Amino acid sequence: MTKRRYFIRAGEVPGYHPANHVGTLNRRLIGRETVGAEQLEVLLGVIEKGKGALPHAHPGIEQVCYMLEGRARAEVAGEVCELGPGDCCFFPPDQQHTFTVLSDEPVKVLVIYAPPYEENPDRVIRPD
């Protein structure tokens, strides 16, 4: 595909695996590397059955997850909810959270970060 300034096809964006998310493939749809966004980042995440985000927090970063396909369980600061297509969850800055796929099919989720998220394995909070 010819490089475009304002249009991204998810299948043409390199995937990456965050250190604190198991069985997850993320594709950066909006960010500095794709459309030059400075204060926003949008990822398309595909997460395998039974996998997801280990307990962790994002220092100083707000995160919203919008469910496209599948079912998942999210826990934020002790509050738990099961999510399906069309549902949303919000992870406030510095708040411990987890995310686990419940459905047989993989989950597809749009993840919106503000300010932009940079994967930093040193900040990963691993379960004891």
Image: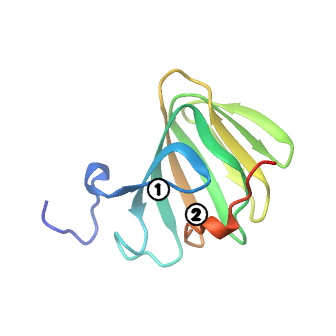
As drawn, which residue projects farthest toward the top? 104
Dividing the image into 4 quarters, which one contains the N terminus?
bottom left
Q: What residue type is labelled 2?
A: Tyr
> Badge 2, how many Cα within 10 Å: few under 14, some, many 20+?
many
Q: What residue type is labelled 1?
A: Leu
Q: Is mark 2 on a helix, strand or loop?
A: strand
* Spot occupied by residue 40 in the image (x, y as percentages of width and height): 52, 70
| As drawn, 16 above or below 23 | below
Q: Quadrant of residue 98?
A: top right
* Spot occupied by residue 57 in the image (x, y as percentages of width and height): 73, 59
Choose between 127 and 106: the one closer to the eye: 127
The tag on residue 15 is: none
Q: Is mark 1 on a helix, strand or loop?
A: strand
Q: Which colour scheme is used?
A: rainbow
Q: Residue at x 65, y 36 (%)?
A: 100
**Residue of label 1:** 43
| As drawn, 32 above or below 92 | below
Precedes in sequence: disc 1 or disc 2: 1
Q: In which quarter of the image is residue 121?
A: bottom right
93 left or right, relative to 110:
right
Q: Which residue is drawn at 55% across and 70% down?
A: 118
Q: How far apart are marks 1 and 2 (CA)?
A: 8 Å
Q: Which residue is drawn at 58% across and 63% down?
A: 113
> Badge 1, how many Cα within 10 Å: few under 14, some, many 20+?
many
* Spot occupied by residue 83 in the image (x, y as percentages of width and height): 65, 32
As drawn, which residue projects farthest toward the left? 2
Q: Does the residue at mark 1 contact the one at mark 2 (Cβ under 8 Å)?
A: yes
Choose between 20 and 80: the one closer to the eye: 20
**Residue of label 2:** 113
